[in-house]
Amino acid sequence: MLKINNLHASVEDKAILRGINLEVKAGEVHAIMGPNGSGKSTLASVIAGKDEYEVTEGEILLENENIDELAPEERAHKGIFLSFQYPVEIPGVSVTNFMKTAINATRKANGLPDMPANEMLKMIREKSEMLEIDRKFLSRSLNEGFSGGEKKRNEIFQMAMLEPKLAILDETDSGLDIDALRIVAKGVNKLRSKDNAVIVITHYQRLLDHIVPDFVHVLFEGRIVKSGGKELAHELEEKGYDWIKEEVNA
Amino acid sequence: MTKYTEDDLREELKTKEYEYGFYTDIESDTFPIGLNEDVVRAISLKKEEPQWMTDWRLEAFRAWEKMIEPEWANVKYVKPDFQSISYYSAPNTKPKYDSLDEVDPELLETFKKLGISLDEQKALAGVAMDVVIDSVSVATTFKKTLNEKGIIFCSMSEAIKEYPELVRKYIGTVVPQKDNFYAALNSAVFSDGSFCYIPKGVRCPMELSTYFRINQANTGQFERTLVVADEGSYVSYLEGCTAPSRDENQLHAAVVELIAMDDAEIKYSTVQNWYPGNSEGKGGVFNFVTKRGLCEKNAKISWTQVETGSAITWKYPSCILKGDNSVGEFYSIAVTNNFQQADTGTKMIHLGKNTKSTIISKGISAGKSQNSYRGLVQISARAENARNFSQCDSLLMGNDCGAHTFPYIEVKNKSSIIEHEATTSKIGEDQIFYCNQRGIDTEKAIALIVNGFSKEVLNKLPMEFAVEAQKLLEISLEGSVG
Ligand SMILES: Nc1ncnc2c1ncn2[C@@H]1O[C@H](COP(=O)(O)OP(=O)(O)OP(=O)(O)O)[C@@H](O)[C@H]1O
Ligand SMILES: [Mg+2]
């Protein structure tokens, strides 16, 4: 599904990603952990195609196609979804209207007609029920005045609506209360199938209790310095990052 | 990786011509350029007006001659040479038509290009059209339904002939001939416009709508609109326009007068899309408009406007809240792009007791444009318990444009409550990336963000107008990535 080879990226001549190699196959869940500032969000943004970051070396392949040249919306049309660490507010645009615009833009790009209104409404009902979102919430302005947890749940609602091939969740667990965490995890697990893949960026094991990863990677100073199974996350939770830093510096 | 940058986008859009930039060649009957008393008399004669009307025009002309063009607005332009403008132009196809089949096919073609074909409009239930092309009404529809209710909706020329006593009684009572430079000019040479009278207690069953167009090279447009809502009546009036693109500056100095008698309500909505000039700032319409409404007891006037066009806009739809408990509202979206300059706003003059006014102004500036809000809230000594709420929001796209707010507040009665809020924001890269990430391209993202920003005002427009207004916002902001 996703293959990243020797990816280097920088912002304003400052190198942030310094040789990332990562392969995510369909059906897999990968967790990316790592200390603050190690480049996790940057990696997510670069995969999503954010302009600000310049790819100086390496390549990103989605289903064997190099996506370096693609605009962010084209990547989205191909099924890349990013749940933002800090979702932005768009005043005056309701969640529903935003979703409708997004879904129809993607359908149009893929040669499909607009989704009929009744189908859209049905889908909205289904997904909002699954994520236990009050429907009144959906007529509010996107992210405006949403609590931290509400923003994150709303990101997952959007993911559920867009049904992406590759979902990247950037610290979706931060700000969620215990119940919300379970609900959000349920939503993510619902999306999991043999055709989809999920990358979960997180600092904590507790999310990984609900969304069990096949692989765990540690990102440090712009490189993946350690990879392992789900037990690696437990180890990190217990011991922190110092031992890894030592390994790297050794 | 080669990125499609904002610069690429800008470049691409510069080459896009004004969407509605075409010109219809209808044979027309145009006066030679220049203005003097004889021209004023000739206009009046041409329109077969009664003597009082001719005198009224002359009085205005003599006043105008002594006036100087105002300079206080925050706009810069080469002043029009009033002697190089032709002051009268009428399509040759004089007789009014009973059916669309009789209308000049080229004209119908024009409407089709605009997406407002009369066919469509006729079908659009509830919308009566009084189409003004180059100053003379060419087609009028839905007259019958209106007749049955005693509603008068016709061209100003027709009103002067058919209802002289009504016109004479009200014209110039809200915007006097000598009110200001442009109003005086308009009073002297106005070509045509619309007249509307709603009798006592009548609720106008449909939106009354007029499409103005400027269609003849070098023909200044001087429309005059008068809407009178008698006691307890209600009317919603829509005014919209587009213009063909061209190089010379075109002057437009309209006057709109609204009179809402006791317990009456007038809603006046405008969607304005005149040619703004090209991306270098050349050409475009100069729009100097005087719009004012008078509210008697318990009356209400709402101005709603979406201004996307014109090279220069100078426009302050105002309410004189003369009667006790009267209400004035102003909802405005003003978009400027490229080299456009807009100085718009409102005046709320509180004279009566318990009068209330609301001002919601949304300014959107892109390119190298300048967008100014200028608002006056005046509370007179006898306006006990007057209230005003003003909110002025500005949205900037890019670093080369400007937004300015000039609120003036004059209070002579201590019991009044006045609130003013103002915000300025910028469309952020992050907002756009967020939309992009969800599959929405940048143009669409901007349209979405702008629509969200303008929502409070768009919501005030009648449905079919709101849809059109949204389209206009999109068109006028193409290529203005922030
Ligand atoms: N636009 C930018 N301009 C300058 N520096 C940036 C920019 N984006 C990221 N950085 C820097 O790159 C480094 C990596 O940032 P990134 O947000 O990817 O970290 P992270 O691993 O997601 O951290 P956290 O766990 O705190 O979310 C940081 O030092 C950050 O300050
Ligand atoms: Mg981060």
Image (spheres, rainbow, N blue to C red):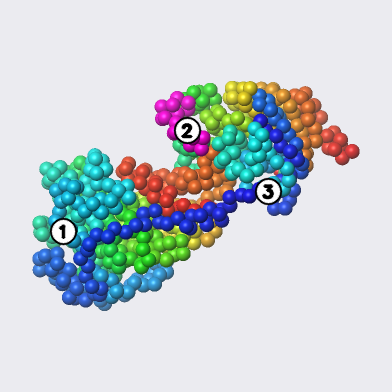
Check the image and report above or below for B77 versus A187. Answer: below
Q: Choose mark 2 or mark 3, whichever is in front.
A: 2
- Kindly identify the amino acid type of the residue bearing the numbered disc 2: Leu
Number of the label disc, if any, that sits on residue A175:
none
Q: Where is residue B406 drawn, in percent x and y? A: 43, 61
Circles 1 and 2 on the same subunit = no
The part of the image, by quadrant, that contains residue B185 is bottom left
Count numbered badges in the picture: 3
SS class, disc 3? strand
Residue under circle 1? B94
Of B415 and B241, nearer the camera is: B241
Seen from the viewer's position, the closer of residues A171 and B325 is: A171
Circle 1: residue type? Lys
Q: Which residues are magenta?
A: A107-124
Q: Which residue is mark 2?
A: A112
The residue labelled by disc 3 is A54
Residue A166 part of the magenta-drawn span: no
Determine whether, in the image, residue A93 is placed left or right of residue B33.
right
How crowded pointer 3 is (Cα within 10 Å; few <14, some 14-19, many 20+) is rated as many
Pointer 1 and pointer 3 on the same chain: no
